[in-house]
Image (spheres, rainbow, N blue to C red):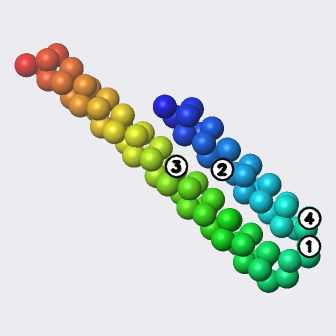
Amino acid sequence: MQGLLMRRIVAVAVAAALALGGAAWSGCGGDDAEDEAQEQVDEIQEQVDESTDELNQQAQEEIDKAQGEIDKAQEEANP
């Protein structure tokens, strides 16, 4: 699951780089092109943030689950 989210983050970062490259390459759109490129960058950043939040939440859930198992094992070992 973590690998899937990491691939999504990388894909979003690549998309951002392509969008910025396209905007810079066109060079002839004036403010409209710059505004559109900035909107794309903002959207991509939001997607990266959401993916990172999901990854952090999943990691915390796994940590909590593991801690619960550790606590249970310690209780069983020390009645």
Asked if residue 27 is positioned above or below residue 72 in the image, the reply reads below
Q: What residue do we see at 23% from left, 31% from top?
A: 68
The residue type indicated by label 2 comes to Val
Quadrant that contains the C terminus: top left
Q: Give the distance between the C-alpha atoms of the residues marked 3 and 4, in whole angstroms.
A: 29 Å
Q: CA distance from mark 2 to mark 4?
A: 20 Å
Disc 2 crowd, CA 10 A, few/some/many (<14, 14-19, 20+)? many
Would you name the residue on which mark 4 appears? 25
Pointer 2 residue: 12
Q: Is residue 79 left or right of residue 71?
A: left
| Residue type, numbered disc 4 | Trp
The answer to whether the residues at label 2 and label 3 have Cβ atoms under 8 Å apart is yes
38 to 48, vertically: above or below: below
Mark 2 vs 4: CB contact within 8 A: no
- Identify residue for label 3: 51
Q: SS for tag 3? A: helix
Which of labels 3 and 1 is toward the front?
1
| Mark identifier at residue 27 | 1
At 72% from the left edge and 72% from the top edge, which residue is drawn? 36
